[in-house]
């Protein structure tokens, strides 16, 4: 079993103990630097990262192989990759880029297993007369049509 495979097995065992937590990314470089990025349905706290790191470290033999490990949560600027992340962020604002390079900044109002629903308001020319009016927009986008989606943080 390769070193990366061994790390993956240990990581899967540790994540099985924390059912709301899930893996975003696992990288093991040639010089045995382990980088793990996690997310959680309820948010990742520092203790979660420490627990996962320790669960792996305690079962890897440092005498056998020199390695380093870095466990972190998905950052706010990290693009969403999994349906589970979209569902977790319903009610928040997203910046979505479609495969056709259309960019939409809107509120994520729904996320099911096939698509997301975005809602936003825009100012558009009136159909009759001069001036502009506020229009409510709603668009459903299939996950396969999304090139990138990032949660927008507002202060």
Image (cartoon, rainbow, N blue to C red):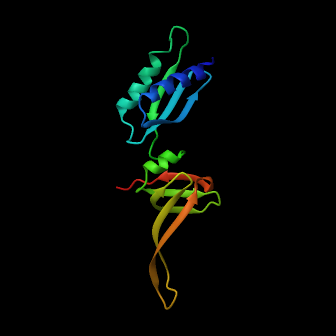
State the image coordinates of residue 9 (x, y, percent, origin top left): 54, 23
State the image coordinates of residue 94 (x, y, percent, origin top left): 47, 56
The quadrant of the rendering that contains the C terminus is bottom left
Q: Residue at x 55, y 31 (%)?
A: 26
Comparing 16 with 155, the one in front is 16
Q: Residue at x 41, y 42 (%)?
A: 41
Q: Residue at x 40, y 53 (%)?
A: 153
Comparing 31 with 50, the one in front is 50
Q: Please, which residue is most extreme toward the bottom here?
A: 129
State the image coordinates of residue 70 (x, y, percent, origin top left): 47, 27
Comparing 88 with 153, the one in front is 88
Q: Please, which residue is most extreme toward the top here?
A: 63
Q: Is residue 79 visible?
A: no
Q: Is residue 119 visible?
A: yes
Q: Is residue 137 left or right of residue 49?
A: right
127 relative to 146, above or below: below
45 relative to 111, above or below: above
Q: Please, which residue is most extreme toward the right here?
A: 100
State the image coordinates of residue 43 (x, y, percent, origin top left): 38, 41
Q: Residue at x 43, y 21 (%)?
A: 55
The quadrant of the rendering that contains the N terminus is top right
Q: How many marks?
A: 0
């Amino acid at each position: 079993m390769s070193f990366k495979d061994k790390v993956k097995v240990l990581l899967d065992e540790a994540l099985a103990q924390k059912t709301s937590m899930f893996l975003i990314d696992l990288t093991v470089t040639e010089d045995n630097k382990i980088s793990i990025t996690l997310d959680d349905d309820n948010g990742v706290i520092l203790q979660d990262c420490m627990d996962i790191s320790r669960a792996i470290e305690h079962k890897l033999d440092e005498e056998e192989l020199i390695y380093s490990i870095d466990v972190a949560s998905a950052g706010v600027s990290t693009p969403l990759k999994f349906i589970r992340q979209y569902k977790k962020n319903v009610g928040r604002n997203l910046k979505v880029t479609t495969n056709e390079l259309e960019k939409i900044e809107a509120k994520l109002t729904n996320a099911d297993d096939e698509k997301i629903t975005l809602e936003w308001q825009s100012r558009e020319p009136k159909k009759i007369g001069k001036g502009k009016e506020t229009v409510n927009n709603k668009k459903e986008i299939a996950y396969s049509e999304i090139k990138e989606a990032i949660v927008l943080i507002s202060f």
